[in-house]
Image: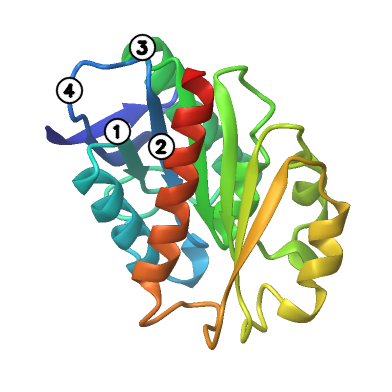
Amino acid sequence: MLQEIKIPILNKNIKLEAEVFYPDNDKKNICVLLAHPHSLYGGNMSNNVVSSLFSTLSKENIPTLRFNFRGVGKSTGSYGHDIGEQEDVRTCIKFLIDKEKFEKILIIGYSYGAAIGCSQVNTFKNIMGYVAIAFPFDLFIKLKNLAQTSKPKLFIQGDMDNIANFRTFLKHFEDMKTPKEYKIVNNADHFFLGFENQVSEYALNFVRNLRVRKKV
């Protein structure tokens, strides 16, 4: 079941535009939360990478929610200078846990969405880990520190990326706690044009493996 919804932020006159796919009533399995690139540079939940992820996960009957940060699309409010956007992620997670009764959440963030989304990995015990696509480590060192966790992590990186700089990627990756893994998308820059399916398959396989591990 595919639904367009609005998620209100507690005690604020802000509602987040979101789209959610529910395959069935199984709330004990992992639900994926997708976070999009920077809103000040045209990022939204219809971004090519986010749309590919949403489509791929939905076709595999994996519960998935994508949303627009405040001030983007039909989401009300205005840019929150990273602090507000972190609140947006927490609000979506609380919605999935408290209202929709999902017991397990996996965050998948792309670019700015990786920095913001993954920084919230330790805020709820229900969060099982994350997938960080083109995490711009050099631009968001404080958020990198918040993204440190002993939960499973997958990093996906284009080897032609000069925004989430590929030259420093391995150094940042080495700094992250285990368990962790990475996948390199050859010939892809920060925008992954033409490589969306490859990125989505890497993320899908991680979700599949995590679902299997958590059932054991």
Question: Which image quadrant for residue 70?
Answer: top left
User: Around disc 3, counting alpha carbons within 10 Å, would you say few (fewer than 14), some (14 to 19), or many (20 or more)?
Assistant: some
User: Around disc 4, counting alpha carbons within 10 Å, would you say few (fewer than 14), some (14 to 19), or many (20 or more)?
Assistant: few
Q: Earlier in the sequence, mark 3 or mark 1?
A: 1
Check residue 196 in the rendering and tell me which mark sits there, or answer none: none
Q: Earlier in the sequence, mark 1 or mark 2?
A: 2
Q: Earlier in the sequence, mark 4 or mark 1?
A: 4
Please say if the residues under marks 3 and 1 sit with CB atoms less than 8 Å apart: no
Question: In terms of depth relative to the viewer, which is nearer, 167 or 98?
Answer: 167
Give residue 7's position: percent from left, percent from top. 33, 29
Q: CA distance from mark 3 to mark 2?
A: 13 Å
What secondary structure is marked by label 1?
loop
Q: Residue at x 49, y 71 (%)?
A: 41
Question: In terms of depth relative to the viewer, which is nearer, 97 or 131?
Answer: 131
Q: CA distance from mark 3 to mark 1?
A: 12 Å
Which residue carries the number 2 mark?
32
Please say if the residues under marks 1 and 2 sit with CB atoms less than 8 Å apart: yes
**Residue 75 in view in this figure:** yes
Question: In terms of depth relative to the viewer, which is nearer, 125 or 12?
Answer: 125
The N terminus appears in which quarter of the rendering? top left
Which residue carries the number 3 mark?
101
Which residue carries the number 1 mark?
63
User: Around disc 1, counting alpha carbons within 10 Å, would you say few (fewer than 14), some (14 to 19), or many (20 or more)?
Assistant: many
Q: Is residue 54 above or below residue 169?
A: above
Which mark is nearer the camera, 3 or 4?
A: 4
Give residue 152's position: percent from left, percent from top. 65, 38
Q: Is residue 205 above or below residue 119?
A: below
What secondary structure is marked by label 2?
strand
Which residue carries the number 4 mark?
24
Q: Residue at x 44, y 50 (%)?
A: 205
Mark 2 is on which residue type? Answer: Val
